[in-house]
Amino acid sequence: MSENKLAKRRPKKSSANHIYSIISVTLILFFIGSIVVGAYFTKNQITKLREDIEFELELKSSLSEGDKVALRKKLSDIHYIRAYEYISKEEAVEWHQAKLGDNYMEQLGENPLYDAFYIKLKSGYVQPDSIQKIKTALYNFPEIKNISYSEVAVDFVSSNLKTVTAILGVICLIFLLIAITLIDNTIRLSMYSQRFLIRSMQLIGATRFFILKPFLSKSIVNGIVSAVLAFAMIFAGILYVKKQYDFHLIAEDLFIFAVPTLLIGLIVVGIILSAFSTWVAVRKYLRMKLDELY
């Protein structure tokens, strides 16, 4: 009677360990994926801050419309300029009147503003050294009288944000190593309950590959299932944040590139870590003596 009870309990124990392993790996992969999403969002925000810094190119008052058209063509051909916009001095007056409510034209009798191009650089060029070289190159254009920009903003994105990125990178690396260690320990604990089965298969003459094969196959399936579950949790969290807080995390490139890449990455990491940890654990029990299993 006791043997029958024991026979009934063993599948339940094995099934419970199997489910526990999937849940544990899912949570750890969810943690890894969340870190990746956070790092991706941080990188995008830093890039956006860099590319939103505006540079004002004040034009000489003696320029003709042909000169302005020629300058526009020159700016469009420069590889480090991401976007540019031309605003005439008449448009500038209208903007000031609409935004500030000042009608200083009536007091001064003339327009004190000037024609200007407003350019935005690509993210990689928003560095103090690069900007100085760019200013030197732009001053060679005879149409440009003066170049101005916010040095405070440039210093902020080039120094402070670089520090923040480095700190986040170190934190992500530490947490990733912790997560990998937890996955390895989880798999090994799961394999611990199978150590006598491994020994039994070895005693009846099964080869190492024959013993390893079912465990590795199961670990690969577990890795895929855990990765899909972790991805579903992360994606649900992204949608919730977007809906609840109107947070512009879900950009077009996040759907086109980042989300599929995240799913594939989680599956690859889940398979590699699960299979490797299983392989190490099974080989460990294959080399152990019988009395060491107890």
Image: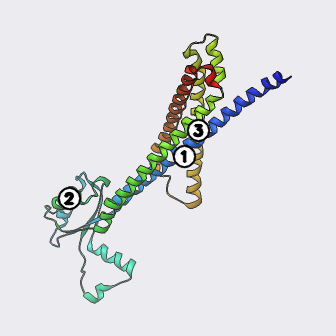
Q: Residue at the right extreme?
A: 1
**Disc 1 on helix, strand or loop?**
helix
Dot placed on the residue nearer the N-terminal end, 3 or 1: 3
Is there a contact, CB below 8 Å, between mark 1 and mark 2?
no
Q: Residue at the bottom extreme?
A: 107
Is there a contact, CB below 8 Å, between mark 3 and mark 1?
no
Q: Does residue 276 appear to the left or right of 236 in the view shown?
A: left
Judging by the rendered image, the residue that carries numbered circle 2 is 134
Q: Amino acid at mark 1?
A: Phe
Judging by the rendered image, the residue that carries numbered circle 1 is 31
**Disc 3 on helix, strand or loop?**
helix
**Disc 2 on helix, strand or loop?**
helix
Query: Which residue does the image show at 35% across and 84% down from the upper left?
Result: 102
Label 1 and label 2: CA atoms lie apart by: 42 Å
**Mark 3 Cα within 10 Å, few/some/many (few <14, many 20+)?**
many
**Mark 2 Cα within 10 Å, few/some/many (few <14, many 20+)?**
some
Label 2 and label 3: CA atoms lie apart by: 50 Å
Is there a contact, CB below 8 Å, between mark 2 and mark 3?
no
Q: Residue at the front extreme?
A: 291
Position of 199 relative to 274 (above/below): above
Q: Position of residue 83 (x, y in %)?
A: 31, 57
Position of 84 relative to 11 (above/below): below
Residue 72 appears in view: no
Q: Amino acid at mark 2?
A: Ile
Of the 4 image quadrants, the one containing the C terminus is top right
Query: Which residue does the image show at 19% across and 66% down from the upper left?
Result: 65
Q: Does residue 16 appear to the left or right of 82 in the view shown?
A: right
Label 3 and label 1: CA atoms lie apart by: 10 Å
| Total labels drawn | 3
Judging by the rendered image, the residue that carries numbered circle 3 is 25
Q: Position of residue 103 (x, y in %)?
A: 34, 85
Front residue (pair 170, 229): 170
